Image: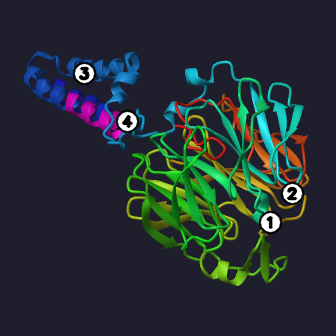
């Protein structure tokens, strides 16, 4: 009878092992273990129990090792029509892992494209040498360089800061050269519907979303968002059914039904350590909008970038005045937590393996901040929701927007108020600094791994 406790012990070991797997795999693992336990009881008298339990567990682990893609392919996520399937429900960033390039980016020049807002141009950097290798003019006030859904074009959105000559400039990734500029009203940012049918141009000044043809940029539809002042950044649910946009000057969020293209709800974020800093004026002048800082503080601050968690449950919302990241349950659309990071929390970028979130803290609470501020980069562990590292910018700085290198080894960020780009080692936090044009903003690293882009500087899936 000595085989029975041994079997129970070994089976328990494998059940513990099952707990580490993703939900779909965990259930299959537990069923195999249950079968092993039942067989163990019947074979205990002949001393086979321990061997059988071991064999069942080993067979399962061998199955995972031998065919990991098959084990995770059965995703329970039902996506909207036309959206590529979710391969791993536990890590929606899994297809953007290091080295997993789409055939669509074959031949693309390895480059970093930096939009210089005040200079009105794009600085081009070779990521292999960390040297500037080119520069070309685009429209007025370029804000972000946005990879297209099909990965074949990079779009520069030039919003012209309230003037009538806003535009969108395409870049050919194969040559690194700009194409013909397309006129568009106030294109501050750009995203793509998860099915790839439309580009979503964020028209901040008019509080609206323009749905455009993703190739020609011809206007398809307009969704007014009057309740979202300063609509700027967004991310999408794991199934593509909704997106959440940040409302920078309303201190809240807007939920958009992507199937019916209508407003699904709004959420005001709670104040977190509401403060009045000595360096803050009473109002911020942002284009033609004057915003009361007291109002921003009382309504939860100034939300900036937003990214969904690997399992799709939570949205991480950077807030420039709250100095941290709000956690919002996407389905229920409720605030559920807050993680303090650093001064002027701004940009959010997941690591290539989907385990960490890099947080750019811009170092100031103003829309137009000083150079050499208290800038830093914080690293959040997705599993624990804890800050596990913090890397101050040497000599002060203003890390803003960017992305992670294709191999995951470097985090590239614009230094908004210091006219530089930071290249940060994602293991050690060591930094290289590259001078660029005046007031660099939403740079993109290209090519990036992934099947398709949801926009911004490369929200890849």
* Magenta run includes residue 121: no
* Magenta run includes residue 31: yes
Tell me which residue sits at (55%, 75%) in the image.
270
Tell me which residue sits at (75%, 37%) in the image.
180
Return the disc, 4 or 2, that comes first in the chain's sequence: 4
Cβ–Cβ below 8 Å for labels 1 and 2? yes
Query: Residue 296: in sight, yes or no?
Result: yes
Number of on-image labels: 4
Q: Nearer the viewer, mark 1 or mark 2?
A: 2
Along the horizontal axis of the image, is 127 left or right of 224?
A: right
Quadrant location of residue 351? Answer: top right
Quadrant location of residue 228? Answer: bottom right
- The kind of secondary structure element at disc 1 is loop
Tell me which residue sits at (12%, 29%) in the image.
38
Q: Badge 1, how many Cα within 10 Å: few under 14, some, many 20+?
A: many
Return the disc, 4 or 1, that comes first in the chain's sequence: 4
Residue 358: horizontal and vertical position, in percent? 66, 47
Residue 17: horizontal and vertical position, in percent? 36, 33
Q: Which residue is mark 2?
A: 417
Return the disc, 3 or 2, that comes first in the chain's sequence: 3
Distance from the alpha carbon under mark 4 to that under mark 1 = 41 Å
Which color scheme did the rendering employ for the protein? rainbow
* Residue range of the region highlighted in magenta in the rendering: 16-32
Q: Quadrant of the N terminus?
A: top left
Q: Nearer the viewer, residue 256 or 67?
A: 256
Q: Nearer the viewer, mark 4 or mark 1?
A: 1
What predominant SS class does the magenta segment belong to? helix
Identify the disc placed on residue 21.
Answer: 4
Q: Which residue is mark 1?
A: 364
Q: Which residue is mark 3?
A: 56
Distance from the alpha carbon under mark 3 to that under mark 2 = 59 Å
Instruction: Please tell me whether residue 22 is drawn above or below residue 332 in the rendered image.
Output: above
């Amino acid at each position: 009878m000595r085989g029975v406790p041994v079997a129970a012990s070994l089976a328990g070991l494998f059940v513990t092992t099952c707990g580490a797997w993703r939900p779909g795999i965990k259930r299959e693992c537990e069923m195999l273990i249950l079968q092993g336990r039942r067989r163990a009881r019947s074979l205990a008298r002949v001393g086979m129990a321990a061997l059988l339990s071991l064999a069942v567990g080993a067979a399962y682990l061998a199955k995972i090792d031998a065919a990991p893609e098959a084990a995770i392919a059965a995703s329970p996520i039902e996506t909207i029509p036309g959206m590529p399937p979710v391969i791993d429900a536990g890590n929606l960033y899994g297809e953007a892992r290091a080295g997993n390039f789409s055939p669509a980016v074959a031949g693309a020049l390895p480059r970093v494209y930096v939009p210089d807002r005040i200079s009105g141009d794009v600085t081009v950097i070779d990521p292999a040498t960390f040297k500037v290798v080119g520069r070309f003019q685009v429209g007025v006030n370029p804000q972000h360089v946005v990879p297209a859904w099909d990965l074949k074009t990079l779009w520069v959105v030039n919003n012209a800061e309230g003037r009538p000559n806003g535009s969108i400039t395409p870049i050919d990734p194969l040559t690194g050269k700009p194409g013909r500029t397309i006129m568009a009203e106030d294109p501050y940012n750009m995203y793509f519907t998860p099915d790839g049918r439309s580009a979503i141009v964020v028209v901040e000044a008019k509080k609206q979303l323009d749905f455009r043809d993703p190739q020609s940029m011809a206007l398809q539809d307009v969704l007014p968002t009057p309740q979202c002042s300063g609509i700027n950044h967004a991310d999408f649910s794991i199934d593509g059914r909704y997106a959440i946009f940040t409302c920078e000057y309303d201190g809240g969020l807007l939920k958009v039904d992507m199937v019916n293209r209508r407003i699904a709800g709004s959420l005001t974020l709670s104040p977190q350590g509401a403060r009045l800093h000595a360096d803050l004026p009473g109002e911020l002048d942002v284009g033609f909008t004057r915003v009361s800082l007291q109002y921003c503080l009382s309504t939860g601050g100034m939300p900036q970038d937003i990214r969904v968690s690997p399992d799709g449950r939570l949205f991480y919302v950077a807030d420039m005045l709250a100095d941290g990241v709000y956690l919002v349950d996407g389905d229920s659309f409720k605030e559920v937590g807050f993680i303090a990071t650093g001064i002027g929390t701004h940009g959010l970028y997941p690591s290539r393996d989907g385990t960490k979130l890099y947080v750019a803290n811009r170092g100031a609470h103003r829309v137009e901040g000083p150079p050499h501020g208290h800038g830093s980069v914080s690293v959040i562990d997705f599993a624990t929701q804890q800050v596990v590292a913090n890397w101050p910018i040497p000599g002060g700085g203003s890390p803003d927007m960017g992305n992670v290198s294709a191999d995951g080894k470097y985090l590239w960020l614009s230094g908004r108020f210091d006219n530089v780009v930071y290249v940060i080692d994602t293991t050690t936090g060591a930094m290289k600094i590259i001078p660029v044009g005046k007031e660099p903003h939403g740079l993109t690293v290209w090519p990036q791994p992934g099947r398709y882009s949801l926009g911004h500087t490369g929200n890849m899936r």
